[in-house]
Image (cartoon, helix red, strand yellow):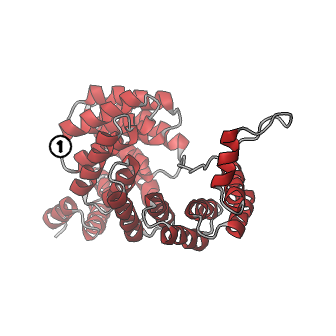
Amino acid sequence: MKRLIFFVSLLISIGSSAQEPSEEFLQKLDSLGATDSTAQAQMMYNKGVAQMEAHNYSEAITFFNQVFNYDGNFALAYLNRGICYMELGSSDKAIGDLKSGLEKDPKLHLAHYEMGVVYEKDNKSEDAITSYSEAIILNPKEAKYYYHRGVLVFQKEEYQKAKDDFTVAVSLESNHAYAYNDRGSANLKLDDLDAAIEDYKKATELNPKLDFAFNNLGSAYRKKGKFDDAIKAYNSALLNKRDYYIAFNNRGLAKLGKKDYEGAIKDFTKAISHKNDYAFAFNNRSSAYILQEEWDKAITDCDKAISLNADYAYAYYNRAIAKEMKRDLDGACADWEVAGNLGLEASRSFYSSSCK
């Protein structure tokens, strides 16, 4: 993630030693006051920033430490030293410095944002949301503050609130492809398929390399029953990322919707070749085999899916169907019972009607 780093320019620039100092140069020296501590602090700070930009975080911290020998109230030095500590994995030190920066400058909204980033990395979502909100209060014109809060609110399944944050983000930064993509996902969760499709399309227009946005677009089309459009979107995702096993799996589902069972099986198999512990793809391939009445292959795939995820209700359900078709009613009933106990209502119905 590219970070905003405040770089304080030196107040004076040194010309050729053969030249007499200009009147302007002398005035700038006078503006430093009775001591050159301010200039020294700024010089150490700028060196620290240069090391930060080169990703030399330990070296940067050394320079920021020296800043405080000259100016203990240098808020931006606390801010950037905190970012360095975060990059080095020292969350407690990072938070301490960011709080110190806010003590020196209560309007330093970027410190609240960076605290949010630290908390988010440490899976402290509520603290992160609070920090992003504080940043927004101080600076309501920064798109990334809304975006990051929206991501966390989305994870809490508060989809309308997430959508609202993503909407503000794109209003402030019209080329924010990630915000369009994520607003599309919020719209998808809110069952507004048309809005989701428009947002995903916008994200892919802004960034044609955004493979997951094409994948999401395909899923929105598939949910809408537009399987050909879905397949085109998945194709675009796979052009960007040729080992994108999720897109292979999803394209297989679209082909399943078109009753192209052989094509679906090929895609599920391709997904498995890129991720051999992908339980979803094994179960989905079992569905295709069931539709082709290849019961033994279906059971084998369900066995594998269940070995990967013992709580996979749909795999038990599919295996039950295949077993029933092989006249193994006891085996089918056992699987329907497990799937029902895992919360699959359709399986409970089959068990009640066929096994009691």
Residue 277 in the image, given as x and y percentages of width and height? 51, 52
At mark 1, the secondary structure is: loop
Q: Residue at 28%, 47% (x, y): give it.
A: 168
| Residue 113 can be seen in this image | yes
> Picture quarter containing residue 215?
top left
Q: Residue at 66%, 40% (x, y): give it.
A: 24
Q: Residue furthest front?
A: 23
| Residue 296 can be seen in this image | no
Q: Amino acid at mark 1?
A: Asp
Question: Residue 162 versus residue 17: which sits nearer the camera?
Answer: 17
In the image, is residue 274 above or below residue 101?
above
Residue 131 in the image, given as x and y percentages of width and height? 40, 65
In the image, is residue 338 above or below residue 304?
below
In the image, is residue 347 above or below residue 234?
below
> Picture quarter containing residue 195?
top left
Please state if 106 lies on the left or on the right of 171 as rendered.
right
Question: Residue 132 versus residue 313: which sits nearer the camera?
Answer: 132
Q: To which residue does mark 1 refer?
A: 192
Residue 312 in the image, given as x and y percentages of width and height? 36, 61
Q: Residue at 25%, 50% (x, y): give it.
A: 163
Locate the C terminus by quadrant: bottom left
Please state if 132 lies on the left or on the right of 92 as rendered.
left
Residue 181 in the image, given as x and y percentages of width and height? 34, 41
Q: Residue furthest right?
A: 18
Question: Residue 200 versus residue 69: which sits nearer the camera?
Answer: 69
Question: Residue 18 versus residue 4: which sits nearer the camera?
Answer: 18
Q: Residue at 31%, 51% (x, y): give it.
A: 322
